[in-house]
Image (tube, rainbow, N blue to C red):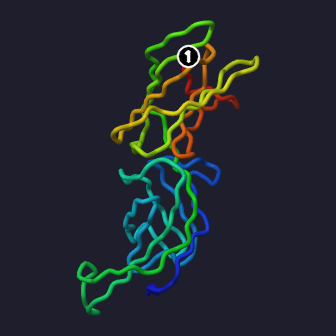
Amino acid sequence: MVSPFANPVIYAAESEKGKKHPVFIGDKIILCGDSLKGEKTLIRIGSVISPLNDDEISKTEISLALDNPLLRAGEQDLQIVHKIGFGHPNAQKDELDWRNGPSSNKIRIKLRPKIVGETRVSNKSGSNGLISADMTAKLNTILGTHQKTYILLNELSPDEPCSYRFPATSKNEDTDEVIFPINRIKAGKYLVRIEVDRAETVLEMQDGVYRGPVVSF
């Protein structure tokens, strides 16, 4: 029998693919801790609270798919929340009055977005070898209007490569597509990353060298 008043404790949260593997929206993560399973167990990631199924939880481990459509990319807090059921001893679970019980410590987790498909460059103009343009990218997650989003460009050049960082245009609605005004950068090819609330997309690597995604200006 699970003690309804045991305080849950989280020791670590990591990708099921390994401790050093980045965690992406849509991945599965493993939480390790103690007293994680309550009468009714929920998980809070940022402002999103989701119930957990009993088959996902043990006293010391939780296996969780990050597939809630309300989840957003970014660095945010993760916490386990227990509910305590009050009512007749013979009542079914859905007949109980569920009230807030103990909550775990909070740990920081970085949910990284992914770039989907190819980026698009439009409205390109330039002079004196410097290029301005709009770059459009699609992500595998919805971006909220309040989320701080940047593009990070690293030139693919062996000689004094340039790096740039530009904010996205303001958004009037939640969307998975984002536009970045690129202002007066050196013409060339660039590795592309997108940062959402301090969580970056990951570059593709081959033979120990970063290969993509790449955009040309």
Classify mark 1: residues with Cα within 10 Å, few (<14), some (14-19) or many (20+): few
Q: Nearer the viewer, residue 64 or 133?
A: 133
Residue at 56% x, 23% y: name it. 214
Q: Where is residue 59 in the image (x, y as percent from the top left)?
A: 51, 76
Residue at 55% x, 30% y: name it. 166
Residue at 39% x, 37% y: name it. 171
Q: Is residue 114 above or below residue 134?
A: below
Of all residues, the one furthest to the top in this rendering is 128
The amino acid type of the residue labelled 1 equals Ser
Quadrant location of the N terminus in the rendered image: bottom left
Q: Where is residue 30 in the image (x, y as percent from the top left)?
A: 53, 61
To which residue does mark 1 refer? 216
Residue at 55% x, 27% y: name it. 213
Counting the numbered discs, the total is 1
Q: Where is residue 60 in the image (x, y as percent from the top left)?
A: 55, 73
Where disc 1 sits, the SS reads strand
